Amino acid sequence: MLRAKMEYKYSVILTKALILLVLVNCDHSTAADLPHAQDRSGAPCVRCNIAPGAPCPKKKDYSRTSCVGCHTFKSPCCDGTVTDYFQSDQFENLFSNRDSLEAHAKGFWDYHSFITASAHYQPYGFGTTYMNSTFFGSKEVAAFLAHVGTRTSCRNKVATKELLEWGLCYNKQMNSNSNNYCDEHNKNIYPCAPGVAYYGRGALPIYWNYNYGEVSKDLKVDLLKHPEYIEQNATLSFQVAIWRWMTPIMEHLPSAHDVFTGYWKPTKNDSLAKQVSGFGATINVLYGDLVCGQGDNEFMNNIISHYLYYLDLMGVGREEAGPYEVLSCAEQVAFNPTTSSSP
């Protein structure tokens, strides 16, 4: 359900100011999510090589309106599980300092929680997608975890040269008393519980009552009344993050999953806006013009560095990441410019 423009504009200015602070600091000190994540209307995968004419799988809030041509291996399909190629020792290598003394969420995150969370979405393509017979699973997991590692890093709090090894240091915004993130213009749809604050929680932090309300629908957990569940349960924390990865911010926009796997195909206007499928487009989807279209900047390059590092540690190799114009969003016009919501 799309929000009206007049509703949207009141929260966007505050959102932009707050998220810029977290992007500069590269940690959880202060942040705000991009506004109005929407119910997903996108990409359940069919199983690869299923019988011609077999129906596509259905899932409420996740079914596409058409499955034309989806019963061949050359079209999008999914197969296997994340555990087929991503093992616990790789998780340990990626997040080797998450249980150190400096970590604020020591003892919270673990491999099993990530795998359990992944299982909720992998039938719909997370980490299991083939596109034109090319497997995107391992690269997608590396891409997703690169965003997670960047947003949950405490690299600015430690004196070390291994700046890419500090992901999963946090599971929530640290100065959580600064804002309750209750959007007055969405209180009728997503009522704020008394005394509850909707600050950033999760492996890819979500903010604001409307985002907590949207993810509650999909996960069937009342996070409007109990947002603290996210910081108490690592599986739920990863599920919320994967929901954000798989869910378009608005109905007419692609998700990070769509732009990474190539399910989304750029139009002529998209190409003129220098929007291309790939890792850079995931940054665009998740952060828009707060990061993208700004030329080289530290936050964007930090995410890219995490991605390349994770590809190496997972045995894929950074040479599989593609050219810079695919990795970067430095010249891309935002999918959802903040100024576009002004009347």
Image: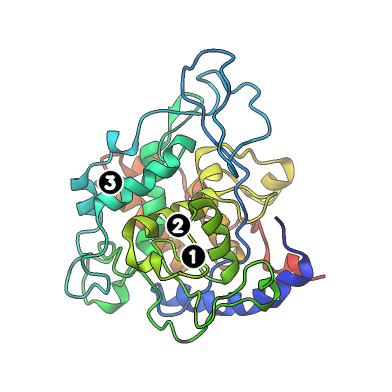
Point out residue 107 in the picture as x, y percentages from the top left corner: 21, 65
Label whose residue precedes the other's in the sequence (2 or 3): 2
Confirm or deny contact between disc 1 and disc 2 (CB under 8 A): yes
Question: Residue at 67% of width from left, 45% of height from top?
Answer: 271
Q: Would you call the spot at circle 3 few (<14 residues within 10 Å), some (14-19), or many (20 or more)?
A: some
The residue that disc 1 covers is: 223
- Residue sticking out furthest to the right: 343
Question: Residue at 57% of width from left, 70% of height from top?
Answer: 209
Label whose residue precedes the other's in the sequence (1 or 3): 1
Q: Say which of marks 2 and 3 sits in front.
A: 2
* 208 versus 150 height, above or below: below
Point out residue 77 in the picture as x, y percentages from the top left corner: 50, 27
Q: Would you call the spot at circle 2 few (<14 residues within 10 Å), some (14-19), or many (20 or more)?
A: many
Point out residue 298 in the picture as x, y percentages from the top left corner: 44, 68
The residue that disc 2 covers is: 240
Front-most of residues 265 and 232: 232
Indicate which disc residue 305 carries.
none
Callout 2: SS: helix
Indicate the amino acid at tag 2. Answer: Val
Indicate the amino acid at tag 1. Answer: Leu
Label whose residue precedes the other's in the sequence (1 or 2): 1
Indicate the amino acid at tag 3. Answer: Asp
Q: Is residue 155 left or right of residue 256?
A: left
Q: Is residue 257 left or right of residue 110?
A: right
Q: Is residue 244 left or right of residue 276?
A: left
Image-quadrant location for residue 343:
bottom right
Confirm or deny contact between disc 1 and disc 3 (CB under 8 A): no
The residue that disc 3 covers is: 312
